């Protein structure tokens, strides 16, 4: 499933091909995604120019300048990759493969192509004022921003009995700490995932915030090496296997202390941790 680092890698991979480009054609082969493809997608995109891509949590934001000379975006498209979606760059004339549902054809001769076998992703217009878009309004801070730090986690967690792992995975606490990254960050910070969020010290939250930043930044850096894969003919884009210390390694020895890694269920999610290193 594409997580925040993959979405950021996608943004960086496609940006050089779409930013500043005029849209000449839109092809929708399958409109039934998680949210139906808007009926007016082609009408509003053709003749418009694409602005600078941004990302919020796992949403890719694509500003659309319908009067290209104005320089002002008057609409924004929101892409979400769902469980199995990907955006890549094809060339005009490259035949679509199965599950290539949407093409945005650009004046340069490149095509932004959306592929999604399970169709849990979507493309939709964002509410013009992002603060009012219900998909974005209640999201917590970006993990790599200064707003996300130990003080934030400490303050937010006081009097909370929920275990620290589901607390960290809550999108209102921070975005992007999916199961893999929360599992790895808790190991790196030496915190038992079952510990009550409200009973963890400020110093340990400082370490946890740093660990979250470190695992996500490493994944984004690693994704950077796959950027060329976003252009047609060079395989699947950007979804990479990271070297993981605990996630998926239940029953194997801890790389730090040699204890056997344990698997438990927390907040309905599988969780692996080291009983030797995580307290
Ligand atoms: Zn250990």
Image (tube, rainbow, N blue to C red):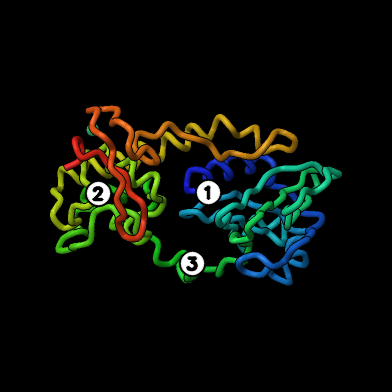
Q: Local crowd at mark 3 within 10 Å, few (<14), some, or many (≥20)?
A: few
Residue found at x 46% / y 54%: 57
Q: Which of 50 and 41 is in front in this view?
A: 41
Q: Is mark 2 on a helix, strand or loop?
A: loop
Q: If you read the primary sequence from the N terminus, does the residue marked by circle 3 or circle 1 appear first?
A: 1
Foreground mark, 2 or 3?
2
Local packing at callout 2 (Cα closer than 10 Å; few below 14, some 14-19, many 20+) is: many
Determine if the C-beta at disc 3 is less than 8 A from ligand 1.
no
Observer-nearest of 163 and 64: 163
Please name which of the two marks, 3 or 1, marks the residue nearer to the observer. 1
Distance Cα–Cα, label 2 vs label 3 = 28 Å
Q: Name the residue under label 1.
A: 2
Residue 121 against residue 257 in the figure, above or below: below
Looking at the image, is mark 2 or mark 1 earlier in the sequence?
1
Under circle 3, the secondary element is: loop
Instruction: Residue at 28%, 31% (x, y): give it.
Output: 254
**Residue 89, horizontal then vertical, whole percent:** 71, 43
Quarter of the view holding residue 235: top right
Dividing the image into 4 quarters, which one contains the C terminus?
top left
Q: Where is residue 258 in the image (x, y as percent from the top left)?
A: 24, 28
Work out whether mark 2 precedes mark 3 in sequence or the reverse, and give the earlier one: 3
Of residues 71 and 39, the one drawn nearer to the viewer in this rendering: 39
Which residue bears the numbered disc 3? 135
Instruction: Find the residue positioned furthest to the right.
Output: 93
Q: Where is mark 2, residue-wise?
A: 193
Label 3 – label 1 distance at C-alpha: 17 Å
Per the rendering, the mark at residue 254 is none
């Amino acid at each position: 499933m594409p997580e925040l680092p993959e979405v950021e890698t996608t943004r960086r991979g496609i940006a050089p091909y779409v930013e500043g480009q005029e849209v000449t054609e839109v092809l929708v082969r399958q409109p039934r995604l998680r949210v139906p493809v808007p009926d007016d997608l082609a009408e509003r995109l053709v003749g418009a120019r694409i602005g600078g891509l941004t990302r919020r949590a796992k949403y890719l934001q694509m500003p659309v300048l319908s009067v290209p000379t104005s320089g002002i975006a008057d609409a924004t498209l929101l892409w979400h990759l769902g469980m199995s979606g990907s955006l890549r760059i094809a060339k005009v004339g490259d035949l679509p493969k199965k599950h290539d549902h949407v093409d945005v054809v650009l004046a340069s001769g490149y095509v932004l192509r959306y592929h999604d076998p399970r169709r849990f992703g979507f493309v939709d217009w964002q509410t013009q004022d992002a603060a009012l878009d219900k998909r974005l309004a209640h999201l917590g801070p970006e993990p790599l921003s200064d707003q996300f730090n130990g003080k934030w986690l400490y303050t937010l967690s006081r009097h909370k009995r929920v275990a620290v792992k589901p607390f960290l995975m809550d999108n209102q606490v921070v975005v992007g700490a999916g199961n893999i990254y929360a599992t790895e960050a808790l190991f790196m910070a030496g915190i038992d995932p079952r510990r009550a969020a409200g009973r963890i010290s400020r110093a340990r939250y400082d370490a946890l915030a740093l660990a979250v930043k470190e695992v996500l930044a490493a994944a984004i850096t690693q994704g950077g090496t796959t950027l060329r894969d976003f252009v047609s003919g060079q395989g699947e884009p950007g979804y990479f296997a990271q070297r993981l210390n605990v996630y998926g390694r239940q029953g194997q020895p801890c790389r730090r202390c040699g204890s056997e890694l344990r698997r438990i269920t927390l907040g309905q999610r599988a969780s692996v941790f080291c009983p030797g290193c995580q307290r």
